[in-house]
Image (cartoon, rainbow, N blue to C red):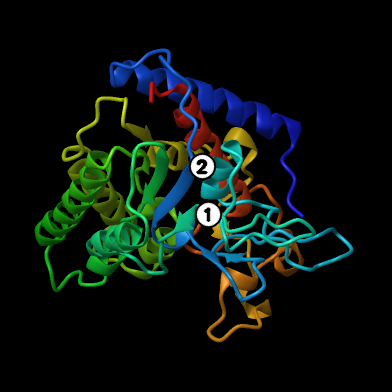
Amino acid sequence: MTHLAPSLRRALGAFAVAAATLLAAACGGGEATTTFRASRVVVFGDESSLLVDPGDHNARKYSVNGIVSDTDPTIACTVNPLWVQAVATFYGLVFPECNAGATPVVAPVSRIRATVGARAADLAAQIDAQQAESPLQAGDMTTVLIGANDVIAQYAQYPTLSEAELIANVEAAGAETGRQVNRIVDTGAKVLLATILDIGVTPFGVAERAAHTDTDRAALLTRMSQRYNAGMRGTIVNDGRRIGLILLDEFVSAVAKFPGLDGYTNTTNGVCDLTKSTLTPPSILDCTSKTFVAGGSGAYLWADDRHLSGTGQSSLGSLALARAQNNPF
């Protein structure tokens, strides 16, 4: 089971407060005029926000899965919560996919529409699915984190496509995400919107740099990530009262640039040993502290070559909660 050291908790808290202050100033925000309390949380995006229910309402994650205890390796979906679970818990809510235990919530109203491998073009269908079941409205808090798969999919076409073409494509994808976020806002729902992390500093990006000599592939992935975020941020209608912008890219880049920052001792390798996976193909869906690489710990930033570890998800959750509490929703 992954625990945060006191020093890490203090550092993350300080980062979250600083980020909240800076963002409030940037968006023209200030003290919330009312305390927003969500009646439900609806999640949109890719696998970084996904709970996979195997049928027992005790979901698995594309991260480090929590376990009951150091002596009981049974997966427990409430341990090592995803960032969206942190948001739901703040509002006293749960998702159907993680609703086990002695007193499960009857008919949870919150929903996860995120899907594995989702890209910006898939966001409209996720919103459509929610609108068909139970339309978004004032009182709803939504979360959006999508776009990393767009960058990776576009990058796979390099050098057949030039960098200029790749940049144009990811900017367009980011703009599409922005349009769909605006669509959510038009329903009256609030949005916690995260920028995508810098793919160039992931273990995937580091490996691509080492494997190719034609150009600095990690730097290319960084530029593509930046332009996706720019396309998204340039399209959203953000007055600070409807959208809470979470700067995941800045946080991850800072941690990757300065090893040891916020207690992260490894920012270049995934902590999950996929050779220990029992799934086909091997996946972090069954990764726990019992299947870490030798010497692995909760101080790793990454679960595998592109997904945040349990501690990484915790950091993202802290940033999200800072926005939820400090934006004048």
Vertical order, 101 against 94 (above or below): below
Could you tell me if the residues under marks 2 and 1 are in contact, i.e. CB atoms within 8 Å? yes
Which label belongs to residue 308? Answer: 1
Amino acid of disc 1: Leu
Q: Nearer the viewer, residue 200 or 215?
A: 200
Q: Is residue 119 above or below residue 244?
A: below
Mark toward the viewer: 2 or 1: 2
Q: Secondary structure at mark 1?
A: loop
Quadrant showing the N terminus: bottom right
Q: CA distance from mark 2 to mark 1?
A: 9 Å
Circle 2: element type = helix
Residue at 12% x, 69% y is: 161
Question: Does residue 72 appear left or right of residue 165 in this picture?
Answer: right
Tag shown at residue 236 = none
Kindly identify the residue that appears in the image at 38 percent across and 42 percent down: 249
Residue that extends furthest to the bottom in the rendered view of this protein: 280
